[in-house]
Amino acid sequence: MLESMLSNIENELKRKNLIDDDDIEILIEEYFRYLSENSYLRAGKIMEKIDCDVNLAYKIITEIESLGYVKPVYSLYCGNCRQEQTKEYEAFTDVPDEALCQTLDCDLELNSKNDLLILFKVMYSND
């Protein structure tokens, strides 16, 4: 992420007082700094870095989303071959009810009710 984005994220997280300053620094220096445009901000990685629960991780992501630095996108996940599908959808309504896994030799039928992932794509411009 860009330095200006990191600074704004740091200020917002401090203002909201969701986590302590040490955890903010860990997230900035060990994770957020290395996110490039169009990469994904992941709750699991936040949980791993600062040892927090999923609710807190999503609160942190929500604050970053409010700054316009990430946007939700949708994808399907195959539990059989444990792969995220490469097709990404901008809106929930664009996700098909059913689709076949895109992984070679899998072809499991996926459905949006059970196999949906919400990802948070990093954006350098919120145009």
Image: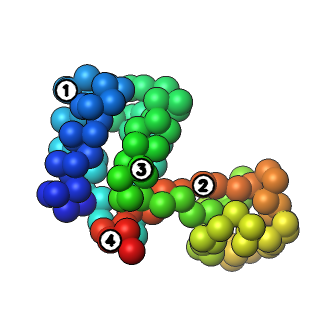
Kind of element beneath mark 4: loop
Quadrant in the picture for the N terminus: bottom left
The x, y position of residue 81, in whole percent, is 68, 59
Foreground tag (2 vs 3):
3
Q: Could you tell me the amino acid type at mark 2?
A: Ile
The residue that mark 2 highlights is 118
State the colouring used for the structure image. Answer: rainbow
Q: Which mark is residue 125?
A: 4
Q: Earlier in the sequence, mark 2 or mark 1?
A: 1
Q: Foreground residue, 15 or 94? A: 15
The x, y position of residue 29, in whole percent, is 18, 44
Kind of element beneath mark 3: helix
Report if residue 107 is visible in the image: no
Q: Quick one: label 1, few (<14), some, or many (20+) residues within 10 Å?
A: few
Dots 2, 4 in contact, CB < 8 A: no
Q: Could you tell me the amino acid type at mark 3?
A: Ser
Quadrant in the picture for the C terminus: bottom left
The residue that mark 3 highlights is 66
Q: Earlier in the sequence, mark 1 or mark 3?
A: 1
Foreground tag (1 vs 4):
4
* Mark 3 vs mark 4, CA separation in Å: 13 Å
* Mark 2 vs mark 3, CA separation in Å: 16 Å
* Mark 1 vs mark 3, CA separation in Å: 22 Å
Q: Earlier in the sequence, mark 2 or mark 4?
A: 2
* Mark 2 vs mark 4, CA separation in Å: 20 Å
The residue that mark 1 highlights is 22
Q: State which quadrant residue 63 falls in.
A: top left
Q: Could you tell me the amino acid type at mark 1?
A: Asp
Residue drawn 65% across the image and 67% down it: 91
Kind of element beneath mark 1: helix
Dots 2, 3 in contact, CB < 8 A: no
Q: Foreground residue, 8 or 45? A: 8
